[in-house]
Amino acid sequence: MEPDPIAPETQLTERETAALNRVRVVTYALDDAVRIPGTDFRFGLDPVLSLLPIAGDAAAAVISLYPVAEAYRLGVPRRTLAGMVLLVAVDAVAGSVPLLGSVFDALWRANRWNYRLLERQLTDPSRG
């Protein structure tokens, strides 16, 4: 996952930059860590974990809440936090369907969306 370039007029604090980097690592591991040879398709631990009934889906959901926790610590608005939690919930529920859930997890990429939501909030010049 290539991060979007940060606009030059946007200054992130060291704390925000560090948090965004940590979220990027988790996102990459869950959604993009493995490339299927000969294709541009990538997947991560999320669909692999969902192959383990119940425990795998629960573990993936807990790890997927990490970006939400970082967003909360950084003071992201509640509306954005609610959207992030909703993405994780959809991922957890749909991902729990045997076999089809793994396919869904490989395509849904809630963690990547949550990373982008957090990045957008932190780089918004109007945030004050």
Image (spheres, rainbow, N blue to C red):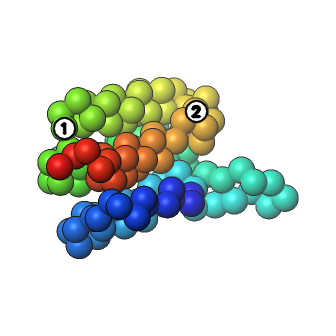
Q: Nearer the viewer, residue 98 or 92?
A: 92
Secondary structure state at the residue bearing disc 1: loop
Q: Picture coordinates of residue 20 (x, y %)?
A: 33, 61
Q: Picture coordinates of residue 60 (x, y %)?
A: 40, 47
Secondary structure state at the residue bearing disc 2: helix
| Residue type marked 1 | Pro
Residue 71 against residue 105 in the figure, above or below: below
- Which residue is the site of mark 1? 77
Residue 57 marker: none
Residue 43 falls left or right of residue 88: right
Q: Nearer the viewer, residue 60 or 117?
A: 117
* Residue that sits furthest to the bottom in the current view: 14
Q: Picture coordinates of residue 16 (x, y %)?
A: 25, 63
Residue 59 falls left or right of residue 126: right
Q: Picture coordinates of residue 22 (x, y %)?
A: 34, 66
- Which residue is the site of mark 2? 104
| Residue type marked 2 | Phe
Q: Residues within 10 Å of mark 1 (few under 14, many from 20)?
A: few
